[in-house]
Image: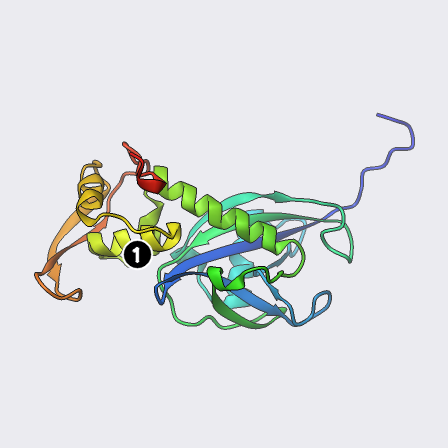
Amino acid sequence: MNEGWQIPTIAVAVDLVVLTVRSEALQVLLVERGIEPYRGRLALPGGFLSSEQEDIDTAAARELTEETGLDAARLHLEQLGAYGVPDRDPRRRVLTVAYLAIVPDLPEPAAGGDARSAQWTPVAKLGRRRLAFDHSRILADGVERARRRLEYTTLATAFCPTHFTVADLRRVYEIVWGETLDPRNFHRKVRGVADFLVPTGEHTTKHGGRPAALFRRGSAEVLHPAILRGGGN
């Protein structure tokens, strides 16, 4: 270690990419910042650790509840990555640990904490609109993580309610990937993965036509074979 070298003081924060499928679109939860910097700009929900003793996962769950009113216990929550570009926050050097959260369609969130408002926003409608800090990059990484994970894992079921049809599940894939899937081929693939879907013994006519079987998520976590984008197999 070089003499005179000092360990830099770095603040630690958490940010959350919360995705859902609602109104036939992939949507992200954004908050309008109520304080500087970037007052009035849209941002991902998040904030600083409350103390040196607070666990990062605990901080992510707490910030989600404080700024949106959502209960982290109902969500799929996983670490997305760490972001530490020196000038990402104009106040000081801040390292943030980003999380990806997947939720079924939920009511409009309630803002709190440092957020002036909280809202679901279609990802496709953001276009080139820049979010506060480096949140546009974090959001892009989160969306791509979700799309990629749908290929190899059973993550798609996290977008669904407790009971759902194969058509509901297929629609999740189509909306998240932005492509149309062949219904019969998709049905064959998902029903061919052991413990992916578990029949409930119940049926629904919500889609019209013949009653469709209802399923719940099984114990499988990995898809074998994978369900690939672009019609791959």
Q: Residue at horizontal 39%, vertical 57%? A: 103
Report if residue 144 is visible in the image: yes
Q: Is residue 89 left or right of residue 30?
A: right
* x and y, in percent, of residue 100 in the image: 49, 50
Residue holding disc 1: 160
- Above or below residue 65? Residue 167 is above
Q: Residue at horizontal 39%, vertical 71%? A: 107
Q: Residue at horizontal 9%, vertical 61%? A: 211
Residue lying farthest left?
210
Residue type highlighted by circle 1: Cys
Q: Is residue 62 left or right of residue 168?
A: right
Quadrant of the image containing the C terminus: top left
Q: Nearer the viewer, residue 204 or 13?
A: 204
Label 1, secondary structure: give it: loop
* x and y, in percent, of residue 97 in the image: 60, 47
* x and y, in percent, of residue 227 in the image: 30, 39
Report if residue 55 is visible in the image: no
Q: Quadrant of residue 42?
A: bottom right
* x and y, in percent, of residue 206 in the image: 17, 66
Q: Is residue 5 left or right of residue 130?
A: right
Quadrant of the image containing the N terminus: top right
